[in-house]
Image (tube, rainbow, N blue to C red):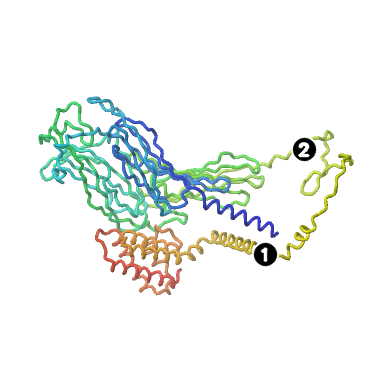
């Protein structure tokens, strides 16, 4: 028994060490290494077996290209108990200048640690020479290079914000958590200009962001503002999904453009140029000056409301949008021990990345193995939609007729502002007995010989034969070695080693049993860890405060409080708000003082994270003190 326990202990230790030291792989690839001006290529950044939270990659340089994010997909595969993950970030790049171009390098944060990724080289060829028509499949952002004589280049101050500016605006001022708001960048210009992307990336803390691809043709209109005529075009759109309740102020960043100034200021001649694109080959020749122009934006505000409690289903997991669900099996008849793949597909409009697939109930006659899940996103027509496919492998333990029950999936419908519950189909399975093993060969009588213990075939007796006539000398045993081997138990080191191994085996079994108990008692585990995790994050926020990291301090202390209350009340972090906390407290708790402190803390965090006015060190220390008191008081409070 001891040897079996010891073997099990070392087996699990080997598996644990292998899992800890699994190698993370980061790869980059492009769909083609040679493109023409105006053509598109796909850039994939793939991160495998990350073992931590992955942030969106940061691209430091895309000179000569316009680009936008096509989305993020994730795959999870479990084979023989080993889980492999793969996250792929896809970008569409559109070449707008010929020559050998370098895309990157890139940086990505995995588990809080920053990794650098090497750059990718692409050869961009001219689109067909001077005066040739642009290819029919050219992107709306396809732009030929505009070169001005260096001695004639104007300083950037030569163009004012009245000549060209950008407005960032949201299509909604108020949404529910996980409901998208569309952020649009609209350029107003009186000059020929080219959109080059972000000069300063937007700050979208508290949001899941999805970029939209550009439209096939940029729609331009004319508007009269303050007596001046402008050409107006939407150059970029993205969907912002708030991940928690609160009032947000979003910094949309700044856009980079090139501005072309000609030697005569005739607005009507401006239309001989393709704004945001190439010069028309039919236009007359001008002497131009071209330079970079940065277009700043004004912050935009958005209020994210908590989802209504009325009518919320018990199995609701936070899905918001408009979805459908279906299930299927790869076979309805199988033998014992044969795997059956159960496939669940959820599709529709919304943040499909955050949708949880409902799980099958416990089934005594099946072994259940998680196989894989994948997410595919499409963002055509300014709608984020896609599908999430989860496959589960079922292996029947016993023959018989079984029914896989339908699954329930609930979501909040943004169109009707109500909760909806969908059901999958039930699946009838017929499990046949396994194939019997064939008779042992070598018997022509058809009579099966008797078997011994555990089904082993007995060995037939044979006559004793002479193997050889050489003399086999008997070798004497080394008496000294025999004495040592017989008295090994008298060596104290032997017993110390046995005791250590026995203690290690019991510790391992105890920790394994505790982990299994924690997995079964998820609420108890969250309660036990809540205070410890919150204190760790408070210490980290205190460290950020000493370093003077303003944004990091408020982000870390907000995460500490929201996760702490979520663990205490056994709810998702997205549902944490003042009303939910007040409802979760028992009537015998010191409600007025505690609730006053919590409300004051939430107000301070919202103001600190989303207001544009920076706080002093004294105010940040005061916020830290309130958070410390709230956690201490809440630990003593009674919950319902």
Q: Is 287 placed left or right of 580 in the picture?
A: left
User: Camera-side residue: 340 or 92?
Assistant: 92
Task: Tell me residue 391's x, y (percent).
Answer: 52, 44
The percent coordinates of residue 200 (x first, y second) are 27, 48
Question: SS at mark 1?
Answer: helix
Instruction: Write down the quadrant of residue 478 in the picture.
Output: bottom right
Q: Nearer the viewer, mark 1 or mark 2?
A: 1
- Residue placed most toward the observer, 292 or 82: 292
Residue drawn at x 34%, y 42% as measured from the top left: 104
Give the mark nearer the N terminus: 1 vs 2.
Answer: 2
In the rendered structure, the answer to whether residue 366 lies left or right of residue 624 reads right
Asked whether disc 1 touches disc 2, contact meaning CB atoms under 8 Å apart, the reply is no
Q: Position of residue 257 (x, y in %)?
A: 22, 41
Towards the viewer: 27 or 255? 27
Residue 93 in which image quadrant: top left
Instruction: Write down the residue under mark 2.
Output: 439
User: What x and y, as percent, mark residue 291?
Assistant: 19, 40
Which element carries disc 2, helix, strand or loop? loop
Q: Does residue 180 appear anywhere in the picture?
A: yes
- The residue under label 1 is 493
Label 1: few (<14), some or many (≥20) within 10 Å? few
Quarter of the image for residue 163 reads top left
Q: Is residue 347 visible?
A: no
Q: Give the number of callouts.
A: 2
Which image quarter holds the N terminus? bottom right
Q: Is residue 190 above or below residue 532?
A: above
């Amino acid at each position: 028994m001891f040897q079996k326990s010891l073997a099990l202990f070392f087996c699990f230790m080997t598996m644990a060490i292998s899992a800890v030291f699994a190698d993370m792989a980061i790869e980059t690839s492009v769909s083609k290494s040679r493109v023409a001006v105006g053509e598109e290529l796909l850039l994939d950044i793939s991160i495998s077996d990350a073992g931590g939270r992955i942030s969106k990659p940061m691209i430091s340089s895309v000179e000569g290209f316009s680009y936008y994010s096509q989305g993020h997909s994730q795959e999870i595969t479990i084979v023989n108990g080993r889980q492999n993950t793969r996250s792929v970030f896809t970008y569409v790049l559109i070449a707008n200048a010929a020559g050998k171009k370098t895309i990157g390098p890139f940086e990505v944060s995995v588990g809080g640690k920053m990794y650098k990724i090497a750059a990718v080289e692409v050869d961009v060829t001219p689109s067909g020479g001077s005066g040739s028509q642009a290819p029919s499949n050219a992107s709306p952002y396809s732009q030929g290079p505009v070169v001005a004589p260096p001695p004639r280049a104007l300083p950037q101050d030569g163009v004012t914000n009245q000549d060209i500016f950008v407005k960032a605006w949201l299509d909604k001022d108020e949404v529910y958590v996980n409901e998208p708001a569309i952020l649009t960048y609209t350029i107003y210009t009186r000059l020929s200009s080219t959109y080059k992307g972000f000069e300063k990336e937007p700050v979208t803390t508290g949001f899941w962001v999805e970029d939209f691809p550009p439209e096939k043709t940029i729609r331009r209109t004319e508007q009269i503002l303050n007596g001046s005529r402008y050409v107006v075009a939407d150059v970029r759109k993205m969907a912002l999904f708030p991940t928690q309740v609160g009032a947000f102020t979003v910094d949309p960043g700044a856009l980079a453009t090139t501005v072309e100034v000609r030697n005569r200021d005739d607005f009507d001649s401006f239309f001989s140029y393709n704004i945001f694109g190439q010069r028309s080959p039919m236009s007359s020749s001008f002497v131009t000056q071209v330079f970079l122009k940065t277009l700043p934006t004004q912050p935009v505000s958005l209020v994210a409301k908590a989802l209504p409690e009325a009518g919320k289903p018990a199995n609701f997991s936070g899905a918001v949008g408009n979805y459908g669900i279906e299930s299927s099996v790869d076979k309805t008849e199988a033998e014992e021990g044969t795997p059956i793949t159960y496939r669940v597909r959820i599709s529709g409009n919304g943040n499909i990345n955050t949708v949880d697939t409902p799980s099958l109930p416990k089934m005594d006659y099946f072994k259940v193995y998680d196989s894989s899940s994948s997410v595919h996103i499409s963002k055509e027509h300014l709608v984020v939609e896609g599908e999430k496919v989860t496959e589960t492998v079922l292996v029947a333990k016993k023959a018989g007729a079984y029914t896989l029950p339908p699954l329930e999936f609930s979501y909040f419908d943004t169109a009707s502002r109500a909760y909806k519950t969908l059901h999958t189909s039930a699946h009838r399975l017929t499990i046949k007995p396994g194939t019997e093993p064939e008779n042992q060969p070598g018997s022509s009588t058809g009579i099966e010989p008797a078997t011994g213990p555990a089904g082993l075939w007995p060995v037939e007796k044979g006559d004793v034969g002479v193997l050889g006539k050489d003399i086999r000398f008997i070798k004497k045993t080394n008496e000294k070695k025999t004495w040592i081997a017989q008295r090994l138990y008298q060596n104290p080191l032997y017993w110390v080693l046995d005791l250590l191994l026995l203690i290690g085996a019991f510790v391992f079994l105890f920790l394994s049993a505790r982990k299994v108990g924690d997995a079964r008692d998820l609420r108890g585990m969250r309660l036990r860890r809540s205070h410890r995790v919150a204190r760790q994050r408070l210490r980290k926020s205190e460290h950020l405060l000493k370093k003077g990291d303003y944004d990091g301090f408020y982000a870390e202390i907000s995460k500490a409080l929201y996760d702490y209350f979520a663990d205490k009340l056994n709810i998702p972090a997205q549902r944490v708000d003042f009303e939910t906390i007040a409802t979760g407290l028992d009537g015998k708790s010191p409600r007025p003082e505690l609730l006053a402190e919590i409300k004051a803390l939430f107000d301070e965090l919202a103001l600190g994270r989303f207001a544009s006015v920076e706080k002093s060190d004294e105010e940040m220390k005061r916020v830290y003190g309130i958070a410390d008191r709230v956690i201490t008081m809440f630990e003593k409070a009674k919950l319902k």
